[in-house]
């Protein structure tokens, strides 16, 4: 899977470049995120602006990443399309994650 | 044999490889764009079919490539019916978990098992049947038949 990471202050922005976050990339995504978290990045913005599809495997991988961070940090989400947001709402994951309109807003929220 | 009037159908065949499932998703997305479901519901319908195909690959075939998953799509005047078929051992899928999780209880937020919940939430009818060697997950989504799909009507 394709992702880009960029540190802005103490916030790690992880940009998902794949359009589909699905079962075919979920394992790879979890492993990549686990590496970033193990490196000490506990404030993460997941930039999903490029994503136009997510299934339960993709959602589960993001939950797994949140659990890996635990209570000593946060993983928030920015740039969800209306469609992808509908899946977060359908599965009640919109109550698990803080979701921001865009990455800048998400970074400001975690930096504050 | 001619099809009944106003019913159109297509069947897709997929090898049991998770990396290829996106092609089914794109096909379903295209078909659903033709149907008066609305864009969010069309998208969620695509997700349901992808979930069903993923489940067939994982649970019917143990994630092993080289097996066939068959996807049938039938367009009626007032509904679209999907059938996802495999020839695996034929375990009846567990009922979706109806217990809501506590969003504040991090350890118990589910990482898996949401596929059937999604399917049951989105689809109007869900049934699991066995037809000969095939296990079939049949899902139906109704739509407003007053918005007739172009191309559905009397056979030419």
Image: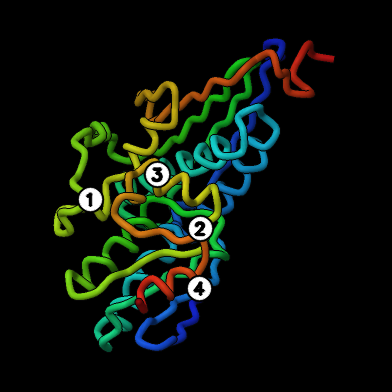
How much space separates mark 1 and mark 2, taking CA atoms? Answer: 19 Å
Identity of the residue drawn at 50% across and 52% down: B21
Q: Which residue is mark 3?
A: A89
How much space separates mark 3 and mark 1, taking CA atoms? Answer: 12 Å
How much space separates mark 2 and mark 4, taking CA atoms? Answer: 13 Å
Identity of the residue drawn at 40% across and 49% down: A88
Chain assignment, label 2: A
Q: In the rendered structure, are the residues bearing label 1 and label 4 in contact, judged by CB atoms less than 8 Å apart?
A: no
Q: In the rendered structure, are the residues bearing label 4 and label 3 in contact, judged by CB atoms less than 8 Å apart?
A: no
From the top left corner, tell me how far across and down residue A36 is, in percent.
32, 83
Q: Residues within 10 Å of mark 2 (few under 14, many from 20)?
A: many
Q: Which residue is mark 4?
A: A104
SS class, disc 4:
helix
Q: Quadrant of residue A32?
A: bottom left
From the top left corner, tell me how far across and down residue B104 is, in percent.
19, 53
SS class, disc 2:
loop
Name the foreground residue: A63 vs A110.
A110
Q: Which residue is mark 2?
A: A80
From the top left corner, tell me how far across and down residue B97 is, in percent.
22, 36
Name the foreground residue: B152 vs A38.
A38
Say above or below: A1 vs A88.
below
The answer to whether one can see residue B1 in this image is no
Chain assignment, label 1: B
Identity of the residue drawn at 30% across and 46% down: B59
How much space separates mark 4 and mark 3, taking CA atoms? Answer: 22 Å
Q: Which mark is residue B103?
A: 1
From the top left corner, tell me how far across and down residue B24 is, in percent.
56, 47
Between marks 1 and 4 in the image, the one whose residue lies nearer the viewer:
4
């Amino acid at each position: 899977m394709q992702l880009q990471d960029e540190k802005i202050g103490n916030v790690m922005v992880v940009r998902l470049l794949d359009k589909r976050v699905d079962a075919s990339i979920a394992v790879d995504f979890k492993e990549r995120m686990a590496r970033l978290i193990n490196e000490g990045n506990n404030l993460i913005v997941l930039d999903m602006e490029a994503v136009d599809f997510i299934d339960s495997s993709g959602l589960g991988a993001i939950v797994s990443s949140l659990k890996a961070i635990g209570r000593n940090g946060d993983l928030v989400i920015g740039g969800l399309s209306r469609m992808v947001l509908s899946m977060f709402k359908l599965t009640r994951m919109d109550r698990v994650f803080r979701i921001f309109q865009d990455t800048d807003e998400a970074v400001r929220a975690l930096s504050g | 044999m001619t099809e009944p009037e106003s019913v159109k159908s297509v069947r897709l065949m997929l090898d049991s490889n998770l990396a290829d499932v996106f092609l089914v998703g794109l096909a379903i997305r295209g078909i659903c764009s033709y149907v008066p479901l609305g864009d969010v519901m069309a998208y969620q319908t695509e997700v349901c079919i992808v979930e069903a195909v993923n489940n067939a690959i994982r649970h019917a075939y143990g994630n092993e490539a080289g097996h066939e998953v068959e996807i049938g799509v039938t367009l009626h005047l007032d509904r679209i019916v999907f059938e996802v078929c495999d020839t695996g051992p034929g375990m009846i899928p567990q009922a979706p978990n109806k217990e809501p999780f506590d969003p504040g209880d991090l350890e118990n937020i589910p990482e898996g098992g949401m596929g059937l919940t999604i399917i049951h939430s989105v689809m109007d009818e869900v049934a699991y049947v066995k037809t000969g060697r095939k296990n079939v997950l049949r899902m139906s989504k109704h739509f407003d038949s007053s918005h007739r799909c172009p191309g559905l009507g009397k056979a030419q």
